[in-house]
């Protein structure tokens, strides 16, 4: 009886294990695989701010061409969106001012009802000055045009047209300045990545020299001061590597800020 119970318990545990494995495999199929620089891993395991590039290879060969990057920047840059809104504001201002002269034009309409009555005005001599009915409807318009609208309107419209041109020229200048920033940040990023790889090699060489020197010192072939010197060289190499990593990350995220999109979306 005990053997049967143990057998049943083992069977239940085995079924639960298979069920969990199946659920895990099902979830893994839904999770797409991406390259993290070393191997293909599930997308859910990648942190949001991870750089999805192979830093051992040239970065400029993994990203889209510079013209494509320019197109992304022009489309998504917040600075250019602000300039586009300034142009739109100048255009609406011109359209609004074009009809400002209508401020001097007003219309009126009134209607009165009740018992019909003659409204007469009599002067001192007894003659009737006017005779009008007290009921009925009246409508009309009053037009008042200031002289500034007559003589200053053409210059005002020319001024607004000039402001529209200024907004467009400023937008074009902002686009040129954006491209200059992209060019500088792009090539700074590429150079920083190559320098980082070179300094990584320096660190590896210095570390290997320290390991060899440690063995040679134990054998009595070199003086301990030589090992100390090599360790100092390794420390300097590691410090330079960290500085180059910092420069790379600064240029990386600066370029993202300028573009307005993640650099991972620009992978080839």
Image (cartoon, rainbow, N blue to C red):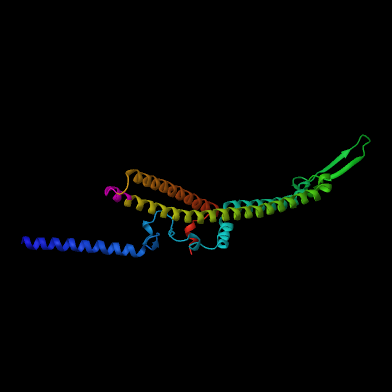
In the current view of this chain or complex, which residue is farthest to the right? 125
Residue sitting farthest toward the top: 124
Q: Could you tell me residue 42's position as x and y percent?
A: 36, 60
- The span shown in magenta is 213-220
Q: Residue 26: where, in percent of width, then height?
A: 31, 64
Whether residue 118 is in magenta: the answer is: no
Can you give x and y, in whole percent of width and height, for residue 181 in the image? 58, 52
Which residue is nearer to you in this view: 224 or 92? Answer: 224
The answer to whether residue 48 shows anywhere in this view is: no
> Toward the viewer: 232 or 136?
232
- Name the residue located 56 percent from the left edge and 61 percent from the top edge: 66
Residue 85 drawn at (x, y percent)? 63, 52
Q: Considering the image in quadrants, where does the N terminus appear?
A: bottom left
Q: Is residue 162 visible?
A: yes
Q: Is residue 214 magenta?
A: yes
Task: Answer with left or right where residue 141 lies relative to residue 225.
Answer: right
Residue at image point 91% right, 36% down: 123
Relative side of 167 to 190, left or right = right
Answer left or right for 245 relative to 210.
right
Work out whether residue 181 or residue 107 is closer to the camera in this orientation and state it: 181
Q: Residue furthest front?
A: 221
Tell me the chief SS of the magenta region: helix
Residue furthest to the left in view is 1
Task: Specify the quadrant of the image occupied by residue 34.
Answer: bottom left
Instruction: Kindly indicate the quadrant of the structure image that contains residue 5.
Output: bottom left
């Amino acid at each position: 009886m005990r053997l049967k119970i143990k057998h049943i318990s083992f069977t239940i545990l085995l079924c639960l294990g298979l069920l969990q494995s199946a659920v895990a495999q099902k979830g893994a199929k839904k999770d797409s695989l991406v390259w993290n620089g070393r191997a293909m891993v599930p997308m859910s395991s990648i942190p949001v701010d991870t750089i999805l590039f192979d830093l051992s290879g040239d970065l400029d060969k993994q990203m889209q061409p510079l013209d494509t990057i320019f197109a992304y920047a022009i489309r998504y840059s917040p600075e250019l969106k602000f300039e586009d809104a300034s142009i739109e504001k100048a255009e609406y201002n011109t359209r609004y001012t074009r009809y400002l002269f209508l401020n001097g034009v007003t219309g009126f309409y009134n209607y009165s009802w009740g018992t019909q009555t003659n409204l007469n005005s009599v002067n001192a001599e007894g003659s009737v000055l006017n005779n009008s009915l007290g009921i009925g409807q009246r409508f009309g318009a009053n037009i008042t045009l200031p002289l500034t609208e007559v003589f200053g309107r053409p210059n005002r419209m020319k001024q607004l047209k000039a402001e529209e041109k200024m907004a467009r020229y400023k937008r074009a200048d902002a686009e040129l300045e954006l491209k200059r920033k992209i060019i500088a940040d792009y090539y700074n990023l590429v150079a920083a990545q190559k320098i980082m790889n070179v300094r990584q090699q320096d660190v590896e060489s210095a570390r290997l020299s320290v390991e060899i020197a440690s063995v040679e010192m134990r054998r009595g072939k070199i003086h301990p001061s030589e090992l100390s010197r090599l360790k100092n060289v390794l420390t300097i190499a590691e410090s330079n590597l960290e500085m180059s990593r910092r420069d790379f990350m600064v240029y990386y995220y600066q370029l993202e800020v300028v573009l307005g999109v993640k650099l991972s979306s620009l992978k080839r």
